[in-house]
């Protein structure tokens, strides 16, 4: 028998873009959430996504507008909602979006560049699913001068602790006296992947900026600012 798509009520609400999980718990406690026509106050109730009908303030979850945000994340901001250590998060930069959106994948604290955020869970899963092979392009400043052979290693695949990397497109942009600047396009998105690939070459990453996801480029957006994706951009990534 096929496995039924079960999620807790709290998770269903937060994934639908209504609010954070903390918000969702509060709203459930306030009696604003109905499952199959009845108010429920249990945030941990299992929901069968194929069968159960969930309403928030009497509106079906699917009826809400989908929101797609492109943020130019600066370094020093976490892609989490709250940080126990009180460090800045990307949510401080999108307060005026007006809807709760979640990051589509992550960028490291020290990485800047294009971060998509949305309340469209299916869209997010499609972009982040490793099997979708959506290309992501980064500008990299390495801590040393890299040889052509080293750049070729990045292209061919590097053996990392979690397996070899898929073939990548790599373009040398320029060499300064001590550093190589290059562009790399990956079709997978493992944790700290670019940094780990460069470290395997006995160098480190001094600067990392994501400039493109699939057909969507960061363009002339200013750092720390966001804009909505155009319907054409959303369609191109779907
Ligand atoms: N690769 C990394 O190492 N870090 C990021 O933030 C993104 C890709």
Image (tube, grey):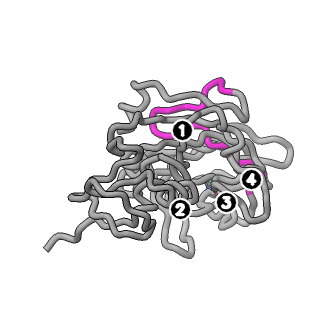
Residue 95 vertical placement versus 19 (above, below): above
Looking at this view, is 161 or 129 the one in front? 129
Would you name the residue on which mark 3 appears? 195
Please state if 96 lies on the left or on the right of 117 as rendered.
right
List x then y, in percent, for residue 37. Answer: 27, 53
* Residue at the farthest right position: 177
Task: Assess whether mark 1 and mark 2 are in contact (beta carbons under 8 angstroms).
Answer: no
- In primary-sequence order, the first of circles 4 and 3 is 4
Name the residue: 13% across, 74% down.
1
Q: Distance between the residues labelled 4 and 2?
A: 16 Å
Q: Give the range drawn in magenta.
A: 205-221
Q: Distance between the residues labelled 2 and 3?
A: 10 Å
Would you name the residue on which mark 1 appears? 99
- Badge 2 marks a residue whose secondary structure is loop
Task: Mark 4 and ligand 1: say if the CB distance to the nearest ligand atom is below 8 Å.
Answer: yes
Residue 217 on the magenta span:
yes
Task: Mark 3 and ligand 1: say if the CB distance to the nearest ligand atom is below 8 Å.
Answer: yes
Residue 100 on the magenta span:
no
Q: Distance between the residues labelled 4 and 1?
A: 26 Å
- In primary-sequence order, the first of circles 3 and 1 is 1
Would you name the residue on which mark 2 appears? 190
Task: Mark 1 and ligand 1: say if the CB distance to the nearest ligand atom is below 8 Å.
Answer: no
Asked where in the image residue 238 lies, by quadrant, the reply is top left
Task: Report the number of numbered marks.
Answer: 4
Residue 143 vertical placement versus 161 (above, below): above
- In primary-sequence order, the first of circles 4 and 2 is 4
- 10 Å neighbourhood of mark 4: few (<14), some, or many (≥20)? some
Task: Assess whether mark 1 and mark 4 are in contact (beta carbons under 8 angstroms).
Answer: no
């Amino acid at each position: 028998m096929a496995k039924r798509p079960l999620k807790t009520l709290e998770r269903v609400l937060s994934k639908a873009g209504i609010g954070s999980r903390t918000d969702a718990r509060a709203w459930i406690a306030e009696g604003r959430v109905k499952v199959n026509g009845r108010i429920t106050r249990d945030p941990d109730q299992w929901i069968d996504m194929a069968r159960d009908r969930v309403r928030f303030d009497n509106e079906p979850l699917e009826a809400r507008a989908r929101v797609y945000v492109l943020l130019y994340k600066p370094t020093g901001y976490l892609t989490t909602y709250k940080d126990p250590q009180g460090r800045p998060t990307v949510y401080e930069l999108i307060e005026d979006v007006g809807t709760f959106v979640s990051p589509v994948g992550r960028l490291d604290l020290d990485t800047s560049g294009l971060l998509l955020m949305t309340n469209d869970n299916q869209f997010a899963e499609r972009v982040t699913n490793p099997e979708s092979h959506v290309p992501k392009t980064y500008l990299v400043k390495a801590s040393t001068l890299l040889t052509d052979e080293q750049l070729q290693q990045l292209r061919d695949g590097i053996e990392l602790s979690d397996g070899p990397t898929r073939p990548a497109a790599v373009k040398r942009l320029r060499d300064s006296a001590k550093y190589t600047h290059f562009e790399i396009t990956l079709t997978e998105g493992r944790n700290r992947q670019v940094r780990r690939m460069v470290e395997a070459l006995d160098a480190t990453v001094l600067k990392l900026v994501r400039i493109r996801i699939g057909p969507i480029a960061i363009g002339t957006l200013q750092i720390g600012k966001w804009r909505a994706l155009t319907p054409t951009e959303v369609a191109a990534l779907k």
